[in-house]
Image (cartoon, grey):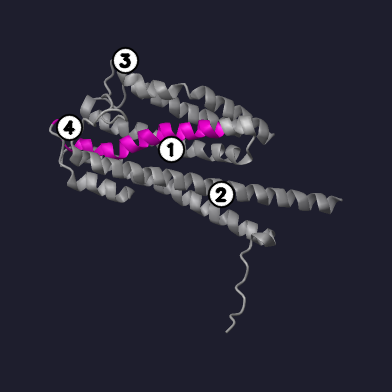
Amino acid sequence: MTSLGLIWGLFFVPADWQQGDAVRIMYVHVPSAWLASAGYLGLAVCSVLSLVWRHPLADLAAVEIGPVGAAFTGLCLLTGSIWGKPMWGAWWVWDARLTSVLVLFFLYLGHIALVRAFDNPERGYRSGAILALIGVVNLPIIKFSVDWWNTLHQPDTITLTGAPTMYVGMLWPLLLSALGYTLVFAAIVVARTRAAVMERRIRALLMMWAEETVA
Amino acid sequence: MTHLPYVVAAYALGVLVPASFGVAAFVRMRAAARRLAAIDPRAKRPEPGPRRG
């Protein structure tokens, strides 16, 4: 599905009258931007489940979402930079949207570092969950940064409440690509979480055998 | 095509980053499943029994 969206966007969508073919970068950049925020929202939900109900699977899922979310945020920043150079004449500007996404990237990195920083994993999970919940305040800032401040980054062309201000021939491959990337993101997180559950079981079995041997 | 190097670079990243994470996750899951099956008999799939009839 992702491949179909990307191929459609690369070869069959007409070039933009202002941006030329650089507009095709949108089919990678926009889904990765959506998933950067959605992944962090998933991280925050897991953090609530971890702090309130102490659910062990939520801890593992939060640990595994972190690197994947950071990768997609990095992808969003890199493709945005690649798109910005021919359009704005600069690889980077300290624009509100770009800066808030950079903060999101650092929040992901902070979470990754914090959950692994303690000898006692439970303390790492709790600290990471608190950091993730504090960082949620950045999500509406990312969303509304283009409305609250004068930004070089364009305003949203697709919203939940209004009709998209984009040519429909460009919209469908974008939605297809976004759906494909979302499924890829979910599949990676599920595979990593399954691996983490099995690794935890292996550690528990080895510890149990070690204790039996000593006894 | 205008801006070809930029488009190619963005698409290359858009394919390579998720693909490398996907392959790494799959390899890690397979390795964990194999290790678990080796030490925990309950993790092994039951052998198919002889067919009757």
Q: Closer to the camera: disc 2 or disc 1? A: 2
Q: CA distance from mark 2 to mark 4?
A: 43 Å
Amino acid carrying label 1: it is Ala
Which chain letter matches label 1?
A
**First in sequence: mark 3 vs mark 4:** 4
The numbered dot on residue A19 is 4
Are marks 1 and 3 in one subunit? Answer: yes
Task: Give the quarter of the image for residue A148.
Answer: top left
**First in sequence: mark 2 vs mark 1:** 1
Other-residue count near label 1 (Cα within 10 Å), few / some / many at <14 / 14–19 / ≥20: many
- Which residue occupies the foreground of this view, A29 or A83? A29
Left or right, residue B17 beside residue B6: right
Amino acid carrying label 4: it is Gln
The numbered dot on residue A71 is 1
**First in sequence: mark 2 vs mark 3:** 3
Residue B16 coordinates in the image, percent (x, y) = 37, 46
Task: Give the quarter of the image for residue A76.
Answer: top left
Residue A67 coordinates in the image, percent (x, y) = 49, 38
* In the depicted structure, whether residue B23 falls above or below residue A34: below
Are marks 2 and 3 in one subunit? Answer: yes
- The boundaries of the magenta stretch are A18-47
Q: CA distance from mark 2 to mark 3?
A: 42 Å
In this view, the residue farthest toward the left is A17
Query: Is residue A117 among what the camera can see?
Result: no
Task: Give the quarter of the image for residue B10.
Answer: top left
> What residue is shown with label 2?
A194
Q: Secondary structure at mark 2?
A: helix
